[in-house]
Amino acid sequence: MAYSFGNVSNDFAVTNLNSGSSVSQNLSIANASIKTLTMPDIPVGTASNIIYINPITGVLSRGAPASNGATGATGATGAIGAIGATGATGPGGTASNTGATGATGATGATGSFGTPGATGATGSTGTAGATGATGATGATGRTGTTGATGTTGATGSSGTPGATGATGATGATGRTGATGSSGTPGATGATGATGATGATGSTGTTGATGASGATGPPGAVQQVNNLVQYLNSSSQLATVTQVRIPGTQLGSPITFPNNSTGALVFATSFDFTGNTLAVVYTPRQVPTSICTILKNSKGIYNPTNLPLPTGSVGSSPFGQQSVNLSNDGTLVAIGSIYDNSAANLSTQVGAVWMFQFDGVSWNQQYGIGGAKITPTNALGAVPCFGYSVSTAGNNLLAVGAFGDNSTGSDNSTGVGAVWILNKNGSNEWIFGQKLIGTPLAAGAHFGISVALSNDSTTLAIGAGGSLNGGTGAAFIYTIVASTWTQQQKISGLIPVGLFGYNVSLSSNGNILAVGSLGNIFVYYRSGGTFSAGSTVPFPYDASGLSNYGLFSYISTNGTAIVVNDRINNSTIGASWMYTPGPVGNWVQNGPALIGQGATGATNQFAGSISGNASKLAICSVTASSNQGCVFIFV
């Protein structure tokens, strides 16, 4: 059955009253001129198929006869009229209100014509418009965000592995190929380095500098004992004297059990052959000795502890020692700057102890009448006599006192002085001259280092303090008419460079090596005057240089120099050997020498080199729970 409805602005519900359940269907007919509803499930021709529409709520329902009572049928007719009113809704909503008038509702039968209004149910096809909600399926379009996966395209930045092309720099490793030069073919490789083979080689000095770099890509080579020396060409090798230099540690480190609670090693000194070594140290307990003599016997250095010097004054007379062993290894000089010092160091006089070997034992020697060797004409309270010592032969001694003529108890203000002593026929040491360089000033530290030539003709004195704006200086003295006379002052070049902190001479006094902070300078004497020769190049295998050059020495035969940096390689320390190269230059010969086999052996420094350059002593003050040790290299 179909029903037509007029212009209704409300949504309405159609209730199937024939059904046992309350099933409702909501239809939206707003703004529609004709709406038709078909209800096929309502039986036609029954008293219950009377449909009523509530003009307010828009709800259709089948009339209930019982609810109308006796008025029943007539009322039902009215209900039909109500249908008419719905039909009137087709042409005009006003007709629907007339239907509500009652009996006139029979006219509403005409309204049944409104059945075509049921065609309005076709309007429910509009519900199909809800199919537009299928448009919501468009939300599936968000899947398009999967397109953002396109950012995966950024993975294209993986193209940066193209930087692996930098691995091409590994081609530089081709230099290692140059190292492969076992002989003449290697020299051909050096020819590849046309620059090195060219002017560098022929220039001499510059060529030798190149030789240091040659440690990487070698040119011509020669064997120097157990080390290999690299130079630019065979012609340069012909100008270089083959010398014996130390490069291998001999056995285990040497410690000093008589000072088992801890002795700090401060200084060593070799004789000319390297078969006798004197070691002085600062004990941390009541000492039995402050010096040990090590004598080589078939590669084993056997120790002899010298007796404790007599005549010391003060609570800690052996706080710091210096040492020098004579060229023949039979006379040792020991300086102790803390002898006769106050506990608060307001006074710090110092003394020197001399021991002579008679073929059987070591015996202490004294000043005149058995007096202790200490100055009587020092200036100020803190001369620090004995800070440096040097012997020549068995009867000449030079003693430095860098704190002489200080202001108050501050030895850093010392002008400094050096005393010359000679030994008489009674084996007594007699004070001779007191040397004071010209010009000097407060804080000059004249005498912080001293070196006598073995032939007793030349004396070098270091003044590594305030002179020349803090660059430091070295002074040269020779004997003129039996008197030591200043011949030359050599000034440092680098401010606060401590130039002169260490000085050493060849046996005849014609080659001078001056240590400083950052380098070692070598000078050659000709016609009575030293002229600058060259600086020693920096080592090619250094790691973190800090005080490079301060501990440096030339062998008395003039064929080798050892240079040290005790802070190298994270305070482990290292020493390097240099030998003469072409045209007076010096060439690093072999890698860094670092002592092995002692626990905690840091701050290693070069103690001394033998006169013939065959032995090297390296000290460590921290090894073996601060007991200290000495490494010997051959």
Image (tube, grey):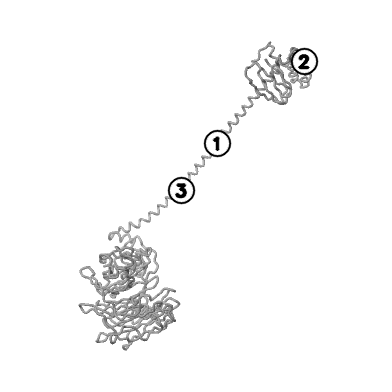
- The nearer-to-camera label among 1 and 2 is 2
- Estimate the x, y position of residue 143 in percent, counting from the top left: 54, 35
- The nearer-to-camera label among 1 and 3 is 1
Q: Residue at x 44, y 76 (%)?
A: 470
Secondary structure found at label 3:
helix
Q: Are marks 1 and 3 in contact (CB under 8 Å)?
A: no
State whether residue 350 is above or below residue 212: below
- The residue pinned by badge 1 equals 144
Is tag 1's residue or tag 2's residue first in the polypeptide sequence? Answer: 2
Between 240 and 18, the one nearer to me in the picture: 18
Work out whether residue 199 can be spotted. Answer: no
Cα–Cα span, label 1 and label 2: 61 Å
State whether residue 363 is above or below residue 265: below
Q: Amino acid at mark 2?
A: Gly
Cα–Cα span, label 1 and label 3: 30 Å
Q: Amino acid at mark 3?
A: Thr
- The residue pinned by badge 2 equals 105
Relative placement, left or right, of 536 versus 133 is: left
- The residue pinned by badge 3 equals 160
Number of numbered discs overlaid on the protein picture? 3
Is tag 1's residue or tag 3's residue first in the polypeptide sequence? Answer: 1
